Structure formats: structure tokens, C-alpha cells
Amino acid sequence: MSAVATENSIYVSDKAKAKVKQLMEEAGVFGDESYFLRVGVVGGGCSGLSYKLDFDNEIKPMDQVFEDNGVKVVTDLKSFLYLVNTELDFSDGLNGKGFYFNNPNASRSCGCGESFAV
């Protein structure tokens, strides 16, 4: 199920929300309101750009802050230009486990789903 873009945002699926919660619990930061999911785009990967995910508790001056499906998501302004209206999802299927982005801005992506081009 894809999110309907009502504004320029970053969306989080139910499966991704559940996995983020589990990982935050394992990291010992779940329930700490200062922590959030930081998403970003960095150079590299087989298609030119790669996604980066991490937990963070420090908001920088040019960061863009979103909340969807109960998950606080923060990205830097440059990454947001690539991630606008993207949905973070999670797969635990046989074809690969992990987070991936349903990115309407990507012109192509690689088979592993971890890098893309615009």
C-alpha cells in the first residue's frame, strides 16, 4: 500500500514502523522522545546514490523534521530533495530482508534496492 502524497513529506509504512520500534527497543532508546530515525542520501552504491538510516538525537539547523505513522523522521535538506514523498517500508520476505524506500523520484534503482539514480 503506497501513501497518498498530500504534502511534501516522508512516509512510514506499518511494517517499517514495527521494525523501527523493535530496533529502538533493542538499542535502548525506545520511549526516549529525543531520539528519532535519521534518513539520508549519500553518494555511492551501484546506481550512484545510497540510502542511509540511523537513530539520532541531535537536530541540525537545516534538518527537515516529519512525523508519519507515529515515527519521527529527520533528514538533512539536501537528502530531502531526493526523498520528497518517499515511503520507508520493510520487507521480511524471501527476496531480501530489510528497509527499502518506495521512491517516486528515482529514475532507476539496483536489484538490492539500496541505491538509486535520479
Image (cartoon, grey):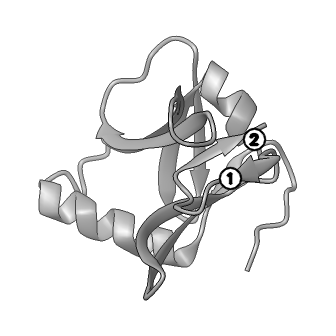
Query: In the picture provided, is 14 more to the left or to the right than 5?
Result: left
Task: Locate the C terminus and report the quarter of the image it occupies.
Answer: top right
Residue 34 visible? The answer is: no
Under circle 2, the secondary element is: loop
Nearest to the observer: residue 102 or residue 32: 102
Q: Residue furthest top?
A: 61
Query: In the picture provided, is 18 more to the left or to the right than 110?
Result: left
For badge 1, the amino acid type reads: Ser
Q: Quadrant of residue 9?
A: top right
Residue under the point 25% across and 63% down? 23
Q: Residue furthest bottom?
A: 94
Image location of residue 103, percent across then percent down: 73, 53
Residue marked by disc 2 = 84
Residue marked by disc 1 = 109
Image location of residue 36, percent across then percent down: 38, 44
As measured in the structure, the alpha-carbon distance from the residue carrying label 2 to the one carrying label 1 is 16 Å
Query: What mark, if any, has residue 35 been given in the picture?
Result: none
